[in-house]
Image (cartoon, helix red, strand yellow):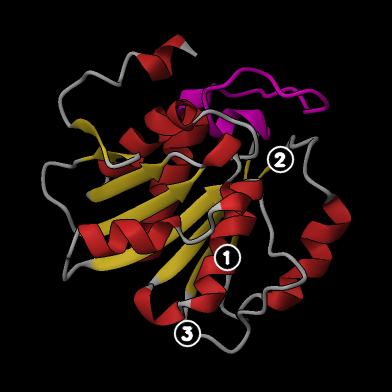
Amino acid sequence: MPEALSLIKTDGVQEENGYYIIEPEEASGNVVFYQGGLVETEAYLPLAQAISEQGFRVFVPSMPLNLAILKTNAFAEIYKENPSNLEWWIGGHSLGGTSALLYADEQPAQLKGAFLLGAYPSDETDLTDTDLEILSLYAENDGVINQDKYQSSQSLLPENTVYHVISGGNHSNFGHYGFQNGDGESSISREEQQQAVAEQFKQMTE
């Protein structure tokens, strides 16, 4: 959407080595965010900016064919190329969240935690015995997510996982890519939903 594309050339947004970096005024942590399936990377720049305004340096990698599942280790490259003593988080929307958890399951020692937006772990992921802090955000009117799998997969996450429902939100509003077929109608704006994500994540990390 135009609101996302307009951020590409703005101050604080850089593109290098196959990923975007959104810089905060003063960083308190690092976030690597994986895009939803078949959604262009740039669609998540407004969300990344909202998270950066909470004090996080946000990295949004470009994925092969816009599918994070094809490059679940994108975090590793960013982690290596951007040394930092600040804590690291991984997250993603929909299939991107599932892909992010696959990496978290392999390399939990690199991470403080993970956050999910309309997403859940795959059957190959089991984080129950890790010390990772997990935030799972679900939109009230999400018509895309598989409800049964969302519920049943919670047994694969740590007991202290924080679950939060964004009232009035839907699946599409986590990014700026338009309305996704099959989704429910949102009663809040994209900006309101993404601000809620940023605030919930900030609260989680305090």
Q: Which element is circle 1 on?
A: helix
Q: Is residue 36 visible?
A: yes
Q: Main secondary structure of the magenta part?
A: loop
Residue designated by label 3:
131
Indicate whether residue 180 is drawn in magenta. Answer: yes
> In this rendering, is residue 198 above or below 129?
above
Instruction: Name the side, left or right, on which 23 lies relative to 94.
Output: left
The structure residue drawn at horizontal position 79% and vertical position 23%, both measured from the top left corner, is 181
User: Residue 1 or 195: which is nearer the viewer?
Assistant: 1
Amino acid type, label 2: Glu
Q: How far apart are the alpha carbons under marks 1 and 3?
A: 14 Å
Quarter of the image that includes the C terminus: bottom left
Q: Which element is circle 2 on?
A: loop
Q: Alpha-carbon neighbours of circle 3 within 10 Å: few (<14), some, or many (≥20)? A: some
Residue designated by label 1:
101
Instruction: Name the side, left or right, on which 15 lies relative to 4.
Output: left
The magenta stretch is 170-191
- Residue 179: percent from left, percent from top: 68, 19
